[in-house]
Amino acid sequence: MNTPALRITLVSETFPPEINGVANTLGRLGDGLRQRGHHVEVVRPRQVGEQPAGDAPDLFLCRGWGVPGYPGLQWGEVSMHTLLRRWRRHRPDVLFIATEGPLGLSALRAARRLGVAVVSGFHTNFPQYCGQYGLGLLARLLTHYLRWFHRRSVATLVPSASQRLELQRRGFERLVLMARGVDAGLFNPARRSQALRDAWGLGPEDIAVLHVGRLAAEKNLGLLRPCLQALQNTYPQRRLRLVVVGDGPQRATLAQQLPDAVFCGTQRGEALAEHFASGDLFLFPSLTETFGNVVLEAMASGLAVVAYDEAAAAQHIRHGHSGALAMPGDQAAFIDAACWLLEESETLRRVRLNARQHASRQGWSAIIEQFEAHLYAACHTVRAGREPAGPGLEIKPTSPAPRG
């Protein structure tokens, strides 16, 4: 039976061409939904240098203000009444709210006032970030707010089983697992470039130890230095070099700690894929990820990944087969795992091949189909009058408006 096309609104404080896991995921989902015949509206802050979009039916830009310590990232700001006026003219069937800041809150309130179905996504582990910065009280307050926020959506999509379990322990409800995919055509070992490796000072048999991501305190990047030192001490006959792709507030500190490392800055698209494919070993020491898209991108590029056993790594790496895992927080085990991968050349070759084979089967098509199904289910829930209502946010469910 054919299902009707939906009017879907994606609400997020970050969106392509910004570079982070949330933006990448939303870009993929939005494009996939449009290809499946749905009308997709995006509500987000105006990005740096971007002109107002006017009253475009598929894009609404609001004011944004910078997030302290995170250049290029913004909170969005718009009143609930502004969204109410817009959505009364162009009524969506369902909202997907990806971020829980002021923009997401205004969108949640407006949608519930109109009786529009809301699905939310838990993409960023702000309470854990606060813990990394020693802000324990703020972490507790944020957890309380986020639990309140997500209880007011029909379902909250989480990208990993470990994240779902953590949120269940904190009292979150209606959690649905929806993983992420990878473009295995873009991230591909065939993009390996010896010219790029030459620029890094590495020959064909040398080892490029890669890290890709935002250079910030919550990413546990202090582990890169002792891990690299252990590799160099264990294999003094091998030529190793750490290559860091990305930018962020810790770049200057890392450059001081790792004077022999190559810092490539932010890379995008095919250039990013070429950097991935030109590496050999991928270190991912983060302990605060809800997923970690770069893990799948590294695997698809044919790299041997060393990571902690949680989020994307727990879902996609089989220890000793397609990568190497350590118990979360066990720094010595993480270092041992990296050293094991270089113990024999055949081990590294086999793990890299298995990683590529696994990741090449994790395409976006199935993820987009799952997402579409969750949106349809949310619409059905609201039409049936079963949407959860929270204190002060009572709703009167109504059916999605017909489209001409």
Image (tube, rainbow, N blue to C red):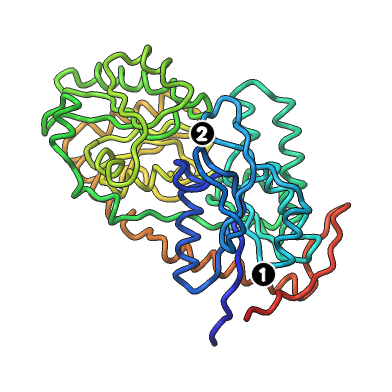
Question: Picture coordinates of residue 38 (x, y %)?
Answer: 53, 71
Please say whether residue 351 is visible from this viewpoint.
no
Please report the residue visible at 41 percent of the width from the left and 60 percent of the height from the top. Answer: 364
Mark 1 neighbour density, 10 Å: few (under 14) some (14–19) many (20 or more): many
Residue 339's tag is: none
Residue at the disc numbered 1 = 93
- Quadrant (top left/top right/bottom left/bottom right) for the N terminus: bottom right
Q: Nearer the viewer, residue 124 or 234?
A: 124
Residue 72's tag is: 2
Question: Picture coordinates of residue 24 (x, y %)?
Answer: 46, 49
Q: Which one is earlier in the sequence, the residue at label 2 or at label 1?
A: 2
Looking at the rendered structure, the kind of residue marked 1 is Asp
Please report the residue visible at 24 percent of the width from the left and 36 percent of the height from the top. Answer: 279
Name the secondary structure under disc 1.
loop
191 relative position to 126: left or right: left
Q: Which of 389 and 169 is in front in this view?
A: 389
Please report the residue visible at 16 percent of the width from the left and 36 percent of the height from the top. Answer: 345
Task: Examine the rendered structure and indicate whether residue 6 appears above or below residue 237.
Answer: below
Query: Which of the 4 quarters of the picture holds residue 338?
Result: top left
